[in-house]
Image (spheres, coloured by chain):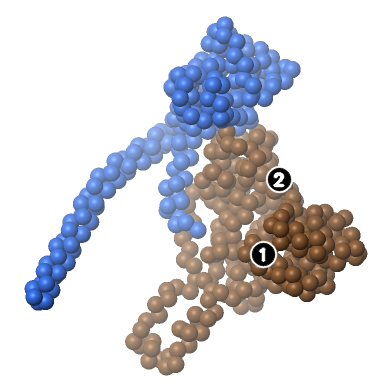
Chain colours: A blue, B brown
Amino acid sequence: MVNLFRRMRKLNAILDIRAGTGAAILPNLTSATKEFPAVTRLHLTYAQKIYQGHAGARHFWRKCMPRLKYHNPGISMTVRQTQDQEVPATLTIYFAERTSSTANALVGSTALTDAHAPPPEKTEKTAVMSLKDLSWTDIWTRVQAATGAQEIATTSEDAEALNKLEEMRIKGEKDKVRVQSMRQAKKDQERMLAEARGEVEKLKQT
Amino acid sequence: MAPLFPAFQQVRGAKGNAQKGKGKNKGKDKAVKPDRRGPREFRQKNLKDMDQFALCDAMRYLRAAEVGREPTNLKYEVHIRLRTRKDGPVIRNMIRFPHAVQTESRICVICPPGSKHAKDALAAGAVMVGEDEVFNAVKEGKIEFDRCLAHPDSVAAMNKAGMGRILGPRGLMPSAKQGTVVDDVASRVEMLRGGTVYRERDAVIRLPIGQLAFSPDQLRDNLRTTVEQVKKDASGLNDRINKEIHEVVLSSTHGPGFSLNGDFQSETSPEPALLTGL
């Protein structure tokens, strides 16, 4: 099994799951308000390549979705990566009973449908947002506006840990340069010695 | 529950021991050369340094790490670290979980066609049964099974047909040592379906333990069965061999590994019902 300390360093990944952009609680059945009904499911569809504005959707999956899932463990989130580049990148939000007014405003009059999204149940209403050419942070602000998600502030311990990791990363970069120069100097020295020895051999032979 | 399969013992590094450890003039050797093989036991780190998690918390993180992945091939995995010597017998056995982890494996049974064993094996769920028809299919390269069993009556025919050359490299060749040449073919077929083989490598046993859609209760049942069986295997090995479980780590197909502290829930973990399904 891998060294304990290396495993612990790897486990810092959970800091990233816990805190950052997208760490928010979506309204559920108990916390739903008139303005923002409960969210039951999310579905994201985007194409395999980033051309035609699919990059943001993929980043949203990579960066925001684990955090959303961590803070909303009961909400099912599915992602479909299509081979077809022409299919628009879309995010389908499933609301219980009715869609929120802001979601309607964000969706606008363009009626998109996502063929890959699971069909809504009778009581569910969906809002299909187009993600074309949006960056992942833009997508997140729109999702937040549409659902009324309550963002969770990073705790001071988490912030401290993240700071420490960042410091380590910066120091690591410096150290990398320093150690590399040391190794290079050693290699140069050895090569010079080898060359000198070779010359001596040559002299002896002649 | 009795072990389903007797634990097979395999002595590792026995040859190296004989050559090095028992040299001709031991006393003299020792004075000149110190033992360069290093410690006899696997070194264990102190787990006090490690963050440990309750089962539900680990599952919450893993489910978050796996979000949006292809749901059919997502599994929870468990890694059981043992306190053990570097040489000596290793644990190697098979387990049947209370909640099946993988889709059933296809099993081929080599036994005289038309016999009682053939009928029983078919009834137990084998996909291919027979002698010559199996041999011909294998020779044509159609190996449409994941496990292969044989009845002792058919072993001679199997060897004659040269199956070892084709099945051997794929790890499918039945042998008595592996427990795949058995009299009671039918019961073994039943056991192999839904069974998972595991073995100890470098003091760690790794095996898939559940689908990501499992509820915490299901996963706990599987985990408990696994740990109990490993303990049983360890105690059944040999009187002088001492193996103990050092650490249990829960991981998943793409997720990081979480050292478990043995608790089911902590104060901050969500409702177990929320951690179910995909």
The quarter of the displayed image where residue A34 is located: top right
Query: Which residue is disc 2 drawn over?
Result: B218
Q: Residue at left 79%, top 72%?
A: B157
Element marked by disc 2:
helix
Residue found farthest to the bottom: B25
Above/below status of B56 relative to B248 = above
Quadrant where the image shows the C terminus of chain B: top right
Q: Amino acid at mark 1?
A: Ile
Query: Which residue is disc 1 drawn over?
Result: B166
Element marked by disc 1:
helix
How far apart, in angstroms, are the residues tagged by discs 2 and 1? 39 Å
Q: Which comes sooner in the sequence, label 2 or label 1?
A: 1
Residue A199 pos. (x, y %):
11, 69
Near-viewer residue (A85 or A38): A85
Q: Residue at left 59%, top 76%?
A: B11
Q: Amino acid at mark 2?
A: Gln
Judge from the rendering whether residue B29 lies leftward or rightward of residue B62; answer left or right.
left
Q: Residue at left 66%, top 47%?
A: B210
> What number of labels is visible?
2
Above/below status of A106 relative to B198 = above
Viewer can see residue A5: yes
Chain on which label 2 sits: B
Residue B265 pos. (x, y %):
62, 43
Near-viewer residue (B166 or B6): B166
The quarter of the displayed image where residue B247 is located: bottom right
